[in-house]
Image (tube, coloured by chain):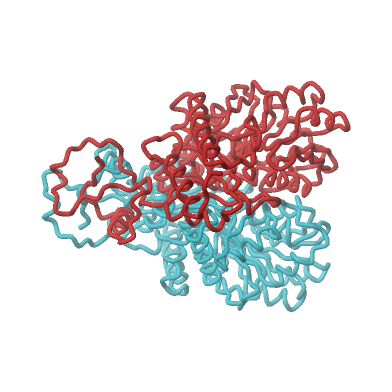
Chain colours: A cyan, B red
Amino acid sequence: MPHREVPDASPARLSLISRHLAPDYPINTPYAVERIPDTIDTSLLPKTQTRKMSTQPPHATLLIPGPIEFDDAVLQSMSHYSESHVAPGFVATFGETLSMLRKLFQTTDTASQPFIVSGSGTLGWDLVAANLIEPGENVLVLGTGYFSDGFADCLGVYGAKVTELKAAVGSRPQLGEIEKALSEKRYKAITVTHVDTSTGVLSELENLSSLVHRVSPDTLILVDGVCSVACEEIQFDAWKLDGVLTASQKAIGCPAGLSISMFSGRAIKALESRKTPPASYFASMKKWLPIMQNYENKKPSYFATPSPQLVHALHTALTQILSKPLKERFARHKEASDKIKKAIADLGLKQVAANPADQAHGMTAIYLPETVKQTDILPSLGKRNVIFAGGIHKEIATKYIRFGHMGVSVLDPARGDIDRAIKALQEGLSEHGYQKA
Amino acid sequence: MPHREVPDASPARLSLISRHLAPDYPINTPYAVERIPDTIDTSLLPKTQTRKMSTQPPHATLLIPGPIEFDDAVLQSMSHYSESHVAPGFVATFGETLSMLRKLFQTTDTASQPFIVSGSGTLGWDLVAANLIEPGENVLVLGTGYFSDGFADCLGVYGAKVTELKAAVGSRPQLGEIEKALSEKRYKAITVTHVDTSTGVLSELENLSSLVHRVSPDTLILVDGVCSVACEEIQFDAWKLDGVLTASQKAIGCPAGLSISMFSGRAIKALESRKTPPASYFASMKKWLPIMQNYENKKPSYFATPSPQLVHALHTALTQILSKPLKERFARHKEASDKIKKAIADLGLKQVAANPADQAHGMTAIYLPETVKQTDILPSLGKRNVIFAGGIHKEIATKYIRFGHMGVSVLDPARGDIDRAIKALQEGLSEHGYQKA
């Protein structure tokens, strides 16, 4: 049974205690612990614990498709004392973090180049659009929802001529259509949103890449992996990808604030052979490239000040991720996803991603019964200390909800997050009069 | 006398303890505490403390011109548990943070608009360059060093026609020259680096703004306040400024990772009346404007995911800053600066910023004696647990060092940071054979 030690005087601990004493103390959160009456001498209790007590105060479980729940050690890394961004200690941390990204993306090709830049995941689109595409060049965007539309908009801002091959809501463009589109003009790049966070649609990368390499070998293959990196398999080298963009706050499990990406030697060559300079200053890969190379070689270097605290947290998160085989991580996400999808089907509900082969493993977009509104069910879940997200695909926004299942919520079964969320969904729907037909 | 309570089992505390036990435990850092032998029953010691024990492990004092040393509560806010970026709790925190920025910038004009965007301080240049200036428009950049050159480069990337009015190293353009330059062509904007972090040169804003409003009233006045906001007086309304850009990790005292800015109604009008769309996607003020307005009105809103943890830390930092009169804060920075500058003069050393009226109050750039190298003195300071920065102005880079004196190191005299740094500098120079002539 978990137990508490004698608290010390640090404010974080005091805040934890004051929450324990609060009358509305939510007991079914992942951080709930049995409260030991003050009269018990805790020094007499056994020191072994079935589960380590969290250093986080009790709070509702965040099960949206990012940000996700964070591991204690990752969150504690966010409070790292101040360091110079060019001091040897931090340079080593940053360099190791870049090197660990190579492992996460499964690339050993020395021409591959990781980038970590302060900013939202969205900044990754600017990296691609302002650096790898020149004004007037064609880009084929595979349309899967809100986020592929966003990528297309961003490309347009920097002057790309965008063709968006849109699939019906809940689906993705098929290889035949893509082959046809590629045959119509010369595309500098094709972009694919690996998991479109608006629909939970998973795109297939391996066969897509084979197709592109076969029919349009000069076309760069650029993947928006914001909602897929660290929960869906991505073999950067084996699948011959040219760019994968992601963010810190999804399956990687580090707080938001970092744009993280990997580019191939071919992508770097496209950058270096531009006829025009990069169309952004802060998002200039030409400015950042030597900085990243220097950091990884443990040499101090400066273009813009990185966030040492976020980099420390990312270092901790990647160290945890790489401490076990990636295959196992992906399998665990698939298992949890299968369980959730079965529970959704058992409830008689449909997913936005209709075809099982197109369903993401780190999130599920769930159509609500016609009789239950989003504004009913989300607060019902909230009352049960479970936070899901509403819909954001403009054509169906009010008709569905999104359940994120990535990182610690999936990998630490002792938390019970997934089971509790499924139960909360069942109860919430029933509270609003829904019965399976 | 500070004392330690019985430790609990949390990893952060364990790491603190293990550092206490380390043989090379540095005792003259701001976080050093007298270590009580384990045989003493700490429960018998008096509970009053002359100074609160820091929750940060011992580390060398970071006295570079940003990032600076952080307050414990600010750092603890970085470890805030995960929240949805559109949940009411976080939306309220973000909204309050934006409102507090109005007070920090001393603006009550409802047309003024604060922005907080994930990214380095450098991103602020992109905000200005991609949104307030259209390709082909003239911008007058007041040249004070590395950072005004950077601002000019950034403006150029987005198509501005830049005229840089460069002053000699350690100086700043004078009002007469500026008036002459403004009379030569129509400038959309003038930019001034309030404190150029490369030289410690402080630019004067009030008279500059009067001049611009008199001789070129349509010209926007845009201030790079990265190294000045929260340590130098800035009266946004009274001085009729149109934009002030800053970053989280300098005098505001929050870890790096946020671009923070304030724009006037006039600047927002320039944005809204653009003939061309903003030239950046992630740095598009048109995209961010409604988001910032919604957050401040406590309405959830989404363009790109903010960093809840950094915003919490900024909220804590701004709450601390605004708990006392700003005048007092600026006066305390001036006092510490005067003391440091006197100590530098007493050592027979010169500052890069030659004219006392042009000397910043949050940093000092110090020319080294000819006989002492940067690569000698910085490690000597490091041995004494004081971290200064090297030079970065290309014309004099190896000849000077930079001493940052902002935030808690100045405002909490019990830390003794400033005195310790001055002593370390004296000892370090003497160690390398320097004697005042």
Using the image as rendered, state which of residue A297 and residue A51 is in the foreground. Answer: A297
Q: Position of residue A43 (x, y in %)?
A: 13, 53
> In the rendered image, is residue B242 in sight?
yes
Q: Is residue B141 left or right of residue A437?
A: right
Residue drawn 35% across and 47% down?
A: B31
Residue drawn 74% across and 79% down?
A: A214
Q: Position of residue B414 (x, y in %)?
A: 36, 36
Using the image as rendered, state which of residue A27 and residue B186 is in the foreground. Answer: B186
Q: Is residue B346 left or right of residue A265?
A: left
Using the image as rendered, state which of residue A320 and residue B216 is in the foreground. Answer: B216
Instruction: Locate residue B211: give its quadrant.
Output: top right
Residue drawn 17% across and 48% down?
A: A36
Q: Position of residue B430 (x, y in %)?
A: 48, 50
- Quadrant assignment for the N terminus of chain B: top left
Using the image as rendered, state which of residue A433 and residue A149 is in the foreground. Answer: A149
Q: Is residue A11 left or right of residue A408?
A: left
Q: Position of residue A430 (x, y in %)?
A: 38, 47
Q: Residue furthest right?
A: B184
- Quadrant assignment for the C terminus of chain B: top right
> In the rendered image, is residue B291 in sight?
no
